[in-house]
Amino acid sequence: MSGLNRYYRRSHIAEKKFRLLLRYFAMDLSASQTAVLSGISRRTTNSVFLKIRLRLLAASQAASPFANSEVDESYFAARRVRGKRGRGAFGKHIVFGIYKRNGFVFTEIVPDVQRKTLQAIIRGRVSLDPVIDSDGWRGYNGLVDVGFDKHYRVNHSKNEFVAQDAHINGIVEIF
C-alpha cells in the first residue's frame, strides 16, 4: 500500500481510500453500497464505519453536559394510523430530545414519556445550573425538586409558545 494513513493507525487502507469511505459514510450509504463503489471489501468497510460511529459517539458524549437546554418529546411513525392521533396512537416511536442552544442535539428513542424515564435522561445529560425550557407535559414535573432551579415552562394548551424568554422553538424545529 502506498503512503501512511494519518486518520487510521495500522491501516492497510491508503488515506485517499479512507477519505472516500468517509465521504460515503457522510452520504449515508450502506457498507455494501460503499464496498461496491470503493472496491474495498464489505467487511473492511463495516469495520471502518463502526470506528467512525464510535468516534462520533465519543465526541457527542464529550459535549455533555448540556447547559441552557430545551427538552421535548415527539412521536414518529412510518405512516399515519387513521383515527389515532397524538400520545395514544399505536405503533409510533417516542423520541425524546435535548437541544443545547449553541447547536448540539441529543436524541433518544424512549419506551414511554413517564417522569421517571425523562428525568433519568435529563439528569444524565444536563448540568444542574442551567436554564431548562420545556412544555407543560407532566413528565417534566419535579425537575426543581431534583436540583434544576431554573425550569421554565411554555403552556401550549393556552396557545402560549413563548413565555418571557422561555421557548422550545429550537428543539421543535429539529423534530
Image: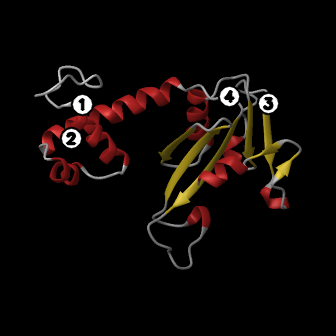
Q: Residues within 10 Å of mark 2 (few under 14, many from 20)?
A: some
Marks 4 and 2 sit apart, C-alpha to C-alpha, by: 35 Å
Identify the image quadrant of residue 164.
top right
Q: Amino acid at mark 1?
A: Glu
Instruction: From the top left corner, tell me how far across and down residue 14 is, in percent.
Output: 19, 31
Taking depth in this image into account, of 38 and 2 the one nearest to the observer is 2
Q: Earlier in the sequence, mark 3 or mark 2?
A: 2
Q: Nearer the viewer, mark 3 or mark 1?
A: 1
Quarter in which the N terminus is drawn: top left
Which residue is found at the position 59% from the left and 40% from the top? 118
Q: Residues within 10 Å of mark 4 (few under 14, many from 20)?
A: some
Marks 3 and 1 sit apart, C-alpha to C-alpha, by: 48 Å
Tell me if label 4 and label 2 are in contact, CB under 8 Å.
no
Q: Earlier in the sequence, mark 4 or mark 3?
A: 4
Which mark, residue 15?
1
Which residue is found at the position 26% from the left and 41% from the top? 21
Task: Determine whether 149 is above or below 156 in the image.
Answer: above
Task: Determine whether 42 is above or below 53 in the image.
Answer: below
Quarter in which the C terminus is drawn: bottom right
Instruction: From the top left corner, tell me how far across and down residue 132 is, in percent.
Output: 73, 35
Residue that label 4 marks:
67
Which residue is found at the position 79% from the left and 26% from the top? 149
Q: Earlier in the sequence, mark 1 or mark 2?
A: 1
Question: Under tag 2, what secondary structure?
Answer: helix
Marks 4 and 3 sit apart, C-alpha to C-alpha, by: 11 Å
Residue that label 2 marks:
46
